[in-house]
Image (cartoon, grey):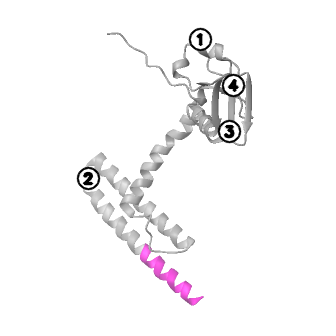
Amino acid sequence: MGYQKQNKAINLSDFEISDDGRVCNCPKGNTPIRSKKNKNRHTAMFDSKKCENCPIKSNCCVKQGKKYHYLRYSDKDLRLSIRKKYEQTDIFKERYRWRAGVEATMSELDRRTGIKHLRVRGINAVRLSAILKAVGLNILRAAAAEVAENNSKYAFFLINFALLTLIIAEKVFFKNFQRSKMCC
């Protein structure tokens, strides 16, 4: 039982595309005989003789027509293929790898604090509320790290004290905030 390589489907991102959106070469290096654009639709016409003898013909997205073999695509298909090609680069992978950590943090912030459903209105009140919730989450994480590292009971006290302090600070702030709004 040997290793059997699976054939990869050839799509628009595998073609060489110029800056103006025209196909320059197919994956095997064949250039189109003609290219045209109508509104947002592009068509590249390849020599049928070359396409018939191509070793990757069965996996290619170029379709046989009466005179030529045609590759038809829209502006949207072109944008998606350019994006797909960019996503395979090392630059994209380096930038994108940080997102997973941030998404997990934002998910935890929502689950533990309910930050998506605040009881306040106005940019200043929302900002302060979000900051206090983020500080609270950081305290919870620090206490969890303390418990994991030292298995101490001090962390439980730290969590309760910090949360109580945050709740009191938030209530005092909003009480003062509401008074200042009523006065003006």
Crowding near the residue tagged with mark 3, few <14, some 14–19, many ≥20 C-alpha atoms within 10 Å: some
Task: Name above or below for residue 75 compared with residue 63.
Answer: below
For image coordinates 52% across by 80% down, the residue present is 177
**Mark pair 3, 1: CA separation:** 27 Å
Residue mark closest to the camera, 2 vs 4: 4
Q: Which residue is mark 4?
A: 45
**Mark pair 2, 4: CA separation:** 72 Å
Callout 3, which amino acid? Arg
Is 76 magenta? The answer is: no
Residue mark closest to the camera, 2 vs 1: 1
Q: Which residue is mark 2?
A: 152
Q: Which residues are magenta?
A: 170-184
Crowding near the residue tagged with mark 4, few <14, some 14–19, many ≥20 C-alpha atoms within 10 Å: many
Q: Which mark is residue 41?
A: 3
Callout 1, which amino acid? Asn
Q: Which mark is residue 53?
A: 1
Give the structural element (helix, strand or loop) at label 3: strand
Sooner in the amino-acid sequence: mark 4 or mark 1? 4
Most extreme residue toward the bottom is 183
For image coordinates 60% across by 88% down, the residue present is 184
Sooner in the amino-acid sequence: mark 2 or mark 1? 1
Q: Is residue 7 left or right of residue 50?
A: left
Crowding near the residue tagged with mark 1, few <14, some 14–19, many ≥20 C-alpha atoms within 10 Å: few
Callout 2, which amino acid? Ser
Q: Is residue 94 left or right of residue 111?
A: right
Is 180 magenta? The answer is: yes
